């Protein structure tokens, strides 16, 4: 009998679990010894449970901090290490490869052929070159267009399994706010699910994406893959739309796995052209054409609207932005900052002096953040620390640039002005043309 190859999967509670489920679970040629975790707080120290790991792993699989990687490789005589998380510069990926190779193991990147699941329903995948390009607003607009044409639509979201008990997140369907509360959703999860619920839509997520797909196919004519970070789709798309961001020119060809989305896309939307420089837009355009000459390129507008803009004018404000966008997405600002400037805020305060606990640690880790408070909330404790940070802040008004209503989950001592953002009218028209063409070919 051939000896099994020993494997470690490096991840962040998303792509790593998916790669295991579709390639390693039940595969007798391999023994997955461990997962390592980074990016997301409190993932390390748990285990991937036997309910998900399958019959070859009756005791589940441990999840260790990525800092222990070299030690685990050497102590377990590991053969292969699989890199399986996203929004990483190419240089970082190869630095990890060097660490793995130096410890004696092979460094592996699994691609679409081994990880994409084929659906029996048409799939539109909306992906991006970086976190925070605006893919979710595009996904929701496509959802809206398809439904107006009389089609049953389901969106499936990239995983966010942050519960301490992963067996509760094997398969999830969100259609109302009770569903979110029952699932103990984090702020990051709510940012993606609430807008669909507000549209009377349904969105699926979880860990086992074959089971999730099977359930979504029962109630949909068309499925939208609403991608996370800059990961490529878990499903084989019939149409791949990739968003690029001219506020971060060059990243469309220098970040993993977003570069895969750039090269593979049928359509590339250079988004946020209404707030980016002409020079940056041209740079992105040239880079895209260099690696994917066949893609249709569209310039997209991202509209930002404050619900009570008059309350911002002349005020000293605290700006809260979408967490992933300004942390591992490396953006220094988001929709909240744009709304503060557009509505003539007197001052945007620096929130670092008011931060507590893990929020303070977040600022230490991401020292590019000076005038924004990331909406971190991966658990009850961190949500409480976010609330305390906001209440500590010396400002008159809070501007919330997250997609959710923070007042639903936080009790704060200041007025919160919500900022909404969506695709502009011209972009909506372009997307409708794309959807019409897709329907004519696929349905």
Image: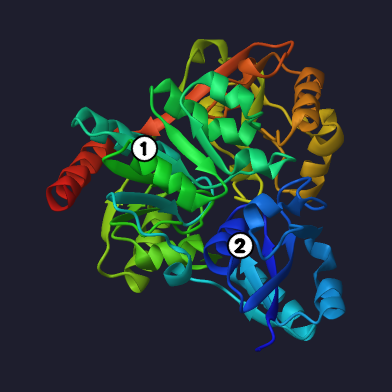
Query: Label 2: how many residues lie within 10 Å, few (<14), some (14-19) or many (20+)?
Result: some
Quick check: 16 left or right of 390? left
Image coloring type = rainbow
Q: Which quarter of the figure has residue 291?
A: bottom left
At a point 49% along the width and 21% down the height, the residue shown is: 176
Instruction: Using the image as rendered, state which of residue 22 and residue 398 is in the foreground.
Output: 22
Q: SS at mark 1? A: strand
Q: SS at mark 2? A: strand
Q: How many marks on residues?
A: 2
Residue 293 visible to the viewer: yes
Q: Which residue is mark 1?
A: 154
Q: Which residue is mark 2?
A: 88
Residue 272: percent from left, percent from top: 41, 43
Choose the circle earlier in sequence order: 1 or 2: 2
Instruction: Using the image as rendered, state which of residue 132 and residue 188 is in the foreground.
Output: 188
Residue 65: percent from left, percent from top: 81, 59
Q: Which quarter of the figure has residue 153?
A: top left
């Amino acid at each position: 009998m051939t000896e099994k190859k020993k494997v470690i999967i490096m991840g962040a509670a998303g792509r790593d679990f998916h790669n295991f489920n579709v390639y390693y679970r039940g595969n007798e040629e391999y023994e997955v010894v461990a997962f390592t975790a980074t990016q997301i707080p409190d993932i390390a120290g748990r285990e991937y449970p036997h309910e998900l790991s399958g019959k070859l792993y009756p005791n589940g699989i441990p999840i260790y901090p990525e800092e222990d990687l070299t030690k685990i490789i050497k102590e377990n005589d590991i053969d292969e290490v699989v890199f399986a998380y996203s929004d990483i510069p190419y240089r970082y990926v190869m630095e990890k490869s060097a660490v793995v190779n130096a410890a004696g193991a092979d460094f592996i990147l699994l691609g679409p052929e081994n990880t994409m699941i084929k659906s029996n329903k048409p799939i539109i995948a909306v992906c991006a070159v970086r976190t925070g390009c605006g893919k979710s607003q595009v996904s929701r607009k496509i959802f809206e267009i398809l439904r107006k044409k009389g089609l049953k639509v389901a969106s499936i979201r990239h995983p966010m399994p942050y519960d301490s008990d992963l067996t509760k997140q094997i398969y999830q369907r969100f259609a109302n706010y009770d569903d979110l509360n029952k699932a103990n959703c984090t702020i990051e999860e709510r940012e993606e699910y609430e807008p669909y619920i507000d549209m009377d839509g349904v969105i699926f997520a979880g860990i086992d994406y074959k089971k999730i797909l099977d359930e979504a196919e029962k109630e949909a004519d068309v499925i939208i893959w609403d991608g996370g970070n800059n990961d490529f789709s878990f499903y084989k798309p019939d149409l791949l739309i990739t968003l690029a961001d001219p506020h971060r020119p060059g990243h469309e060809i220098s970040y993993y796995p977003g570069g895969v989305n750039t090269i593979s896309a049928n359509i590339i939307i250079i988004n946020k052209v209404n707030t980016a420089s002409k020079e940056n837009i041209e740079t992105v355009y040239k880079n895209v054409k260099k690696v994917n000459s066949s893609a249709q390129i569209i310039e997209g507008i991202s509209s930002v609207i404050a619900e009570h803009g008059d309350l911002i004018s002349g005020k000293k404000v605290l700006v809260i932005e979408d967490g992933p966008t300004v942390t591992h997405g490396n953006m220094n600002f988001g929709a909240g900052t744009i709304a503060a400037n557009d509505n003539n805020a007197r001052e945007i305060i620096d929130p670092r002096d008011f931060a507590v606990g893990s929020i303070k640690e977040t600022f230490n880790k991401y020292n590019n953040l000076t005038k924004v408070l990331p909406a971190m909330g991966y658990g009850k404790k961190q949500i409480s620390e976010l609330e305390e940070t906001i209440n500590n802040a010396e400002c008159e008004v809070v501007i919330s640039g997250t997609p959710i209503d923070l007042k639903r989950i936080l009790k704060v001592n200041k007025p919160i002005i919500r900022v909404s953002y969506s695709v502009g009218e011209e972009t909506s028209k372009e997307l409708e043309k794309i959807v019409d063409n897709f329907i004519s070919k696929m349905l």
